[in-house]
């Protein structure tokens, strides 16, 4: 393995020299050779811009509702008269929370974590008997990072719950025109007009001693089957709702740090 | 004080002793914005659900006078929609994937953000609106590209924006939009099907059959004096015309940021290997040789580099009369290539003699082989010493292994206690188990360092098998594996192996 480094023609790159073929190909055309590139000024990187490591949301309770028989049907019946009358217990409530006010004026790339898990399109944060539960997903606008909460009660109340979330907002990956391609000095080091800068924490592969680690999913994290919902993370699979009987068991992921 | 260092093996930069750039722990990189897939106002539709009907008829006498009444309802059939769906509950309905863009072929990870609004809401179910599960008008980060769209028992819907595994002829990879929707299969105690009743009770009709969920009221009549007007087959029955529409429409802005998280084949940490894992097959059935076709085995190794495929196998049988039963051999046939014999590196066969015809056998094994071809898929064949009835296979691809010989192995039936396996820095460990839980659906778990994995449930004979799982240990450590917990299974085998 041999590393190559070059700053030329408005580009700066560090790459793995291919075992054969055009050794300059990763420098000249990085998007077609990302598998050999460690850094290239034409590419984008996720640099942490803002972080709140512990945002506490006090999710409120949702009262239970005892359902009644549907319109026009007999209230009950035995085996010969049928006992399938649906009783529509429970309530459903959507609540949007502001996790972080960034006021950047654009929608940034971001992630929200719950414990060691990235909040997915269906993250279960509370579960009680009779399918009472709270499911969250995240969202961003030009001013905030938010949390969409869906609460489900039964004929019993869904209890209030306090949960902590971590918010990561990434910097706009545009280069800084005030900086050059490469600066190496005792006082400062940066590459690619600041895309790598000693003042930044980049999302990167893990190394020994890392503590701020999380993961990037490579495969699907949520599935539906049999009317139910399942989510997977590196910690395993969770039936978010219903009796899932489909084929989502595991997750391929990349462990990263910053 | 800043430093910058470069050798043939490593480039790194540090500030005050803290490394902030390192080719040994390189940053995840993403394409320039011009190569992002950005789609505006994409119309996404979920079709109406398959439905049937339910009919309630009541008759009786009050003070010697005959009365009758009826009510009719739309029912939702059990169903699963998606690409190439198959399984239970059936029937299944095709909802094909759609290619919505392409990204560079070296892409191995995508960030997906979706800003969607529901433009067409489905009908209510029993008076409850089906909620949108995400924030309409906000940009939702969708890890793994997945987004739950709607959920209200007995139905659910999702969409996913996915990276194709396969290269196009022009060297790009497709970005795929996937939709899935589903209704639970649950048997209700309808009295009987169809028309042939003048007796009070519920009957069902149409596609939904006896598994239909009552969802929407169509019509009620009565009570009226007399008999014979309002039964399903009466002279003036309640309407069975479907008055519902459970289709959903979304309009979505989609942003896909393609990137690369793995420098292949150099795995950043010297001597390291990176394993891509996934369940490739689970089945019940009687097999002496269990075969899987089209198993994904990862991207081909580049020139001058190697790929090994590792498979982990569990098998079981609870109606046996002898044992133990071995997992004797395995072979892998890459697409377009010849069969390659795999080397068994770990094996455990557990026999529980129950002094009858219900003896239990549970076996697990790990195999490895170098697979140097250009193939991304392979056929895998596993041969047992006799017919087995539950089967679970996982597959991993590892690049530039230092050795095909494991650093450490475990072949065990140890239960509810921690067992250690050592890993080399940058290496990884794989574990797989076969177990039986006497019908218990909880309590038996399999994990490393108390991070329990998902359990693969094999339905027949109340057998349960744990899905194997890859554990990448970039730090190198002694990992602690615990199989089962108090009150759980009674017969099992499990194996583990570590490589680098």
Image: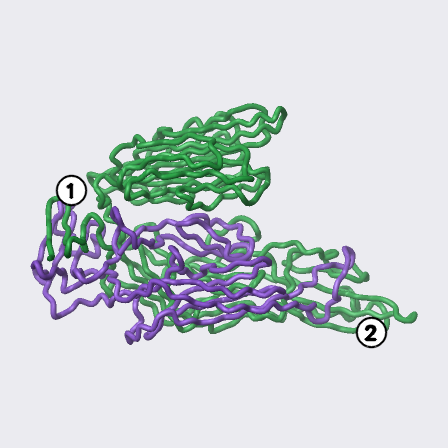
Residue found at x 11% / y 57%: B2
Chain letter of the green region: B
Please tell me which residue lies in front, B214 or B480.
B480
- Residue B444: x %, y % from top left: 51, 41
Query: Is residue B171 among the parts visible in the rendering?
Result: no
Callout 2 and callout 1 share a chain: no
Q: Would you name the residue on which mark 1 appears? A: A1
The residue that mark 2 highlights is: B224
Picture coordinates of residue B287, whole percent (x, y) = 51, 32
Distance from Cα at disc 2 to Cα at disc 1: 89 Å
Looking at the picture, how far across and down is residue B485, in whole percent? 50, 40
Q: Residue at x 50, y 33 (%)?
A: B492
The residue tagged with tag 2: helix, strand or loop? strand
Quarter of the figure with residue B219: bottom right
Palette colour of chain A: purple
Quarter of the rendering occupied by the C terminus of chain B? top left
């Amino acid at each position: 393995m041999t590393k190559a480094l070059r700053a030329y023609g408005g580009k700066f790159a560090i790459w793995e020299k291919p075992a054969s073929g055009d050794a300059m190909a990763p420098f000249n055309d990085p998007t077609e050779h990302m598998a050999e590139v460690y850094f290239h000024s034409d590419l984008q990187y996720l640099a942490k811009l803002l972080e709140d490591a512990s945002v506490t949301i006090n999710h409120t309770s949702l009262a239970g509702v005892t359902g009644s028989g549907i319109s026009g049907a007999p209230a009950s019946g035995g085996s010969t008269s049928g006992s399938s009358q649906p009783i529509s217990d429970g309530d459903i409530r959507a609540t949007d929370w502001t996790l972080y006010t960034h006021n950047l004026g654009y929608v940034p790339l971001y992630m929200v974590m719950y414990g060691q898990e990235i909040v997915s399109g269906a993250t279960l944060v509370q579960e009680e008997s009779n399918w009472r539960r709270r499911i969250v997903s995240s969202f961003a606008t030009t001013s905030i990072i938010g949390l969409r909460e869906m609460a489900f009660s039964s004929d019993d109340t869904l209890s209030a719950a306090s949960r902590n979330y971590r918010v990561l907002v990434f910097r706009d990956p545009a280069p800084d025109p005030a900086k050059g391609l490469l600066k190496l000095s005792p006082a400062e080091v940066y590459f690619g007009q600041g895309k790598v800068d000693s003042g930044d924490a980049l999302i990167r592969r893990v190394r020994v001693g890392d503590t701020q680690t999380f993961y990037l999913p490579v495969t699907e994290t949520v599935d539906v089957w049999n009317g139910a919902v399942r989510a997977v993370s590196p910690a395993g699979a969770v039936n978010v709702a219903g009796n899932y009987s489909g084929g989502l068991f595991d997750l391929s992921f990349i462990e990263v740090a910053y | 004080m800043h430093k910058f260092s470069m050798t043939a093996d490593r480039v790194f930069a540090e500030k005050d002793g803290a490394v902030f750039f390192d080719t040994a722990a390189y940053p995840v990189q993403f394409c320039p914005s011009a190569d992002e897939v950005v789609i505006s106002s994409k119309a996404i539709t979920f079709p109406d659900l398959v439905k049937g009907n339910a009919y309630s008829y009541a008759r009786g006498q009050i003070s010697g006078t005959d009365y009758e009444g009826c009510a009719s309802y739309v029912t939702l059939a059990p169903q699963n929609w998606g690409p190439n769906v198959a399984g239970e509950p059936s029937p299944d309905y095709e909802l094909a994937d759609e290619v919505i863009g392409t990204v560079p072929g070296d892409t191995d990870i995508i960030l997906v953000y979706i800003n969607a609004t529901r433009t067409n809401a489905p009908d209510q179910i029993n008076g409850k609106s089906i909620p949108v599960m995400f924030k309409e008008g906000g940009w939702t980060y969708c890890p793994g590209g997945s987004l739950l769209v709607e959920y209200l028992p007995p139905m659910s819907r999702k969409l996913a924006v996915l990276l194709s595994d396969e290269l196009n002829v022009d060297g790009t990879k497709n970005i795929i939009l996937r939709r899935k929707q589903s209704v639970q299969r649950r048997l209700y105690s309808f009295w009987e099907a169809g028309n042939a009743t003048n007796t009070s009770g519920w009957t069902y009709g149409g596609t939904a059959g006896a598994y239909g969920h009552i969802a929407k009221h169509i019509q009620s009549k009565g009570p009226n004096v007399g008999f014979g007007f309002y039964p399903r087959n009466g002279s003036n029955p309640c309407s069975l015309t479907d008055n519902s529409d459970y289709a959903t429409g979304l309009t979505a802005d989609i942003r896909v940021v393609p990137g690369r998280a793995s420098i292949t084949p150099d795995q950043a940490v010297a001597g390291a290997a990176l394993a891509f894992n996934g369940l490739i097959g689970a089945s019940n059935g009687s097999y002496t040789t269990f075969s899987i076709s089209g198993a994904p085995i990862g991207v081909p190794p580049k020139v001058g580099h190697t790929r090994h495929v590792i498979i982990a196998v569990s098998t079981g049988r609870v109606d046996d009369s002898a044992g133990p039963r071995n997992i004797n051999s395995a072979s892998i046939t890459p697409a377009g290539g010849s069969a390659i014999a795999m080397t068994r590196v770990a094996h455990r066969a557990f026999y529980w003699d129950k002094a009858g015809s219900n003896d239990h056998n549970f076996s697990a094994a790990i195999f490895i082989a170098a697979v140097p071809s250009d193939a991304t898929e392979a056929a895998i064949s596993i041969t047992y010493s006799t017919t087995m009835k539950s089967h679970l296979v996982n597959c991993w691809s590892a690049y530039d292994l230092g050795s095909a010989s494991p650093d450490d192995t475990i072949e065990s039936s140890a239960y509810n206690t921690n067992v250690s396996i050592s890993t080399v820095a940058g290496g990884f460990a794989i574990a797989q188990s076969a177990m039986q839980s006497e019908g218990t659906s909880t309590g038996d778990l399999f994990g490393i360092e108390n991070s329990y994995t998902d359990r693969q449930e094999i339905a027949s004979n109340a057998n349960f098998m744990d899905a194997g799982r890859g554990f990448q240990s970039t730090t190198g450590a002694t990992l602690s594996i615990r199989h089962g917990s108090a009150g759980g299974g009674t017969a099992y085998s499990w194996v583990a192996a570590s490589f680098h």
